[in-house]
Amino acid sequence: MAEAVPVAAESFAGCRARAARTVLGQVVLPGDELLLPEQEDPEGPGGAGERPLRLNPGTRTRVRVVCGPGLRRCGNRLLVTKCGRLRHKESGSGGGVYWVDSQQKRYVPVKGDHVIGIVTAKSGDIFKVDVGGSEPASLSYLAFEGATKRNRPNVQVGDLIYGQFVVANKDMEPEMVCIDSCGRANGMGVIGQDGLLFKVTLGLIRKLLAPDCEIIQEVGKLYPLEIVFGMNGRIWVKAKTIQQTLILANILEACEHMTTDQRKQIFSRLAET
Amino acid sequence: MEWATQTDTKVRTETGTESGPRGPGCSLRHFACEQNLLSRPDGSASFLQGDTSVLAGVYGPAEVKVSKEIFNKATLEVILRPKIGLPGVAEKTRERLIRNTCEAVVLGALHPRTSITVVLQVVSDAGSLLACCLNATCMALVDAGVPMQALFCGVTCTLDSDGALVLDPTAKQEKEARAVLTFALDSVERKLLMSTTKGLYSNAEFHQCLAAAQAASQHVFRFYRESLQRRYSKS
C-alpha cells in the first residue's frame, strides 16, 4: 500500500497544469493545462520562475502569446484540445506561438492555405470545389489570372484546382481564389491533364512543406518531376513516365513511417536502378 | 465520507497490476488499444478489455444533412452495430448514452454546421461492453483530432448479492450480479459525465461504486497516455 499511494498521486499530478516550457516536444493530451512562463520576472529569485500569464500587464511589459491549433485559452492558462506534440516558435517580441502538432486526416479550411481542390459543379458565376473540408469551397470565375466577364477561364467539372483560401472561418462557406493580391497566378490555377493525385495525412504534408525538408530535395534528385502539395493532404505528382509517377507517389506515401536511415537506403537503391 | 476513502485505498492497491491475475474482487482486466487501423475513417481505434473488443471509426467534421444541421455547433451521431443481427432497442439506448457523454466533452462549437459521426462495431462481448464502447469512442475521437476539453473513460462495476464490488466484470459476473453500474468520467476533475445502472443498490453503495470507478479511471487514463505517447513516438 505504501507503494500504491504515491503512484496514484503522481498520476493525478500528471493532468494538473504544467509549465509549457517543460513539455515542449512532448505528447500532450486533451484536457491538459499549460502554464506560460512570465517573460519579465522582477522578483525572480524567490519564485519558481514560472507563474500564470496575466491578462492585465500592469507595470510589466506585455507578452504576446498566440494559441495555434489544438490550444485554447482557459482563464490564465492554455487548455490542450488535441493530442499531439507541443511545439513552440519564438517571435520577435517574446512569448511566441504555441501549437499542437497532431496527426490528422480531416482537413479544416484555414485562411491563406494553399490547397488542391476538385471542381464538382459549375453554377452561374462560381465553381464549387471539393477541398476535403466539411463543405465545398466556392471559387469565382473572375478569380483567375487574366479572367474578365468576357474572357472566362476554361474550367470543367472534374478539373483539379490549386488555389488559396481568402475566406475560411467556421461560420461561413470557404472561398478560394487562384490569384495572389497582385492579380498574378503565381503557380495557382487549373492543374494540367496528366499526373496522379493521392491523399496523405496532414502531418506528412506539413513535414514535406517544412523549409528544410530533405525528402523533397532527395526526390528531386531522383527523377525530373512536377509536384503540387495541398495543405489539405492532397499531392499531385507527374514525372516523365507513368512508372516513375507511381514510384514517386509510393515513396512519398511511405515516407511518413520511415526513419531517415531507411529512407536514405531506399533512395540510394532507387538511384542505382 | 469514511467509507469512500476506505474503498479508494483498497481499490488502488488491488488494481496495481493491470495485466496480472484478477484479485479477490476489484481489479481491471488487461487493456489493449490500437489506433489509426482503418484507412477510410478520419480516426479509428480498437479497444480491448479482457475478451471484450470494440472497433470504432470517427468521421468528422464532415458535411451534414440540412435536416440535422445545428447552426451553432456540430451534430454528433453515434451508431452502434451489434456483433450479429440488426441494432435493437438496447443498442439505441447505448448509442444515446455514448452520444450524451461525447457531447459533454467535444467542443462542437468550433465546427458549427458539421457532423461528427462515430461508428462502433462490437467485435466480441465478454462483459463491460458499454465501458469498452466509451473507451473506444474516446480513443477514436482523439485519433481523428476532434477538439475536446477533456478525455473520458467508461468504467463498469457490479455488486453481487453479499455486497462485494467487482470492477470491470466479465459477462458471467454481470449476469450473476445484483446491480450493474456504468460510469463515464472525465480526465480533468474525474467528474461524472454519465451513469447508467441496472438492479438494486442503496445510496451508499452507489457512492462506493462511484469512488471505486474514479480510482479505476486513473489507470485507464494512464493507459491512454501511454498508448498515445507510444503512437506519437513513431513519427
Image (cartoon, grey):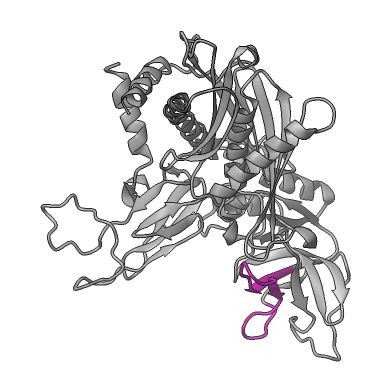
Q: Nearer the viewer, residue A57 or A21?
A: A57
Q: Which residues are magenta?
A: A162-185
Is residue A271 at least partly visible in the picture? no
Please name the predominant secondary structure of the magenta segment in the image: loop
Q: Quadrant of the C terminus of chain A?
A: top right
Q: Residue at x 78, y 55 (%)?
A: A197
Q: Residue at x 43, y 53 (%)?
A: A79
- Judged left or right of residue B8, residue A131 is right
Which image quarter holds the N terminus of chain A? Answer: top left
Is A243 included in the stretch rendered in magenta?
A: no
Q: Position of residue A164 (x, y in %)?
A: 66, 71
Picture layout, residue A76 above or below residue B172:
below
Q: Observer-nearest residue: B189 or A196? A: B189
Point 42% across, 46% down: residue? A32
Place of residue B49 in the rendered image (x, y in percent of width and height, measured from the top left): 59, 22
Tell whether position A173 is magenta. Answer: yes
In the rendered structure, the answer to whether residue B233 lies left or right of residue A187 reads: left
Q: Does residue B197 sit above or below B143 in this rendering?
A: above
Residue A37's image quarter? bottom left
Q: Residue A107: give x, y in percent of width and height.
A: 65, 57
Q: Quadrant of residue B124?
A: top right
Q: Residue at x 52, y 60 (%)?
A: A211
Residue A170's spot in the image, x, y percent?
62, 67
Between residues A245 and A22, which one lies in front from this camera angle? A22
> Residue A121 lies in what quarter of the image?
bottom right
Q: Is residue B215 visible?
A: yes
> How many circles with numbers are drawn on the protein?
0
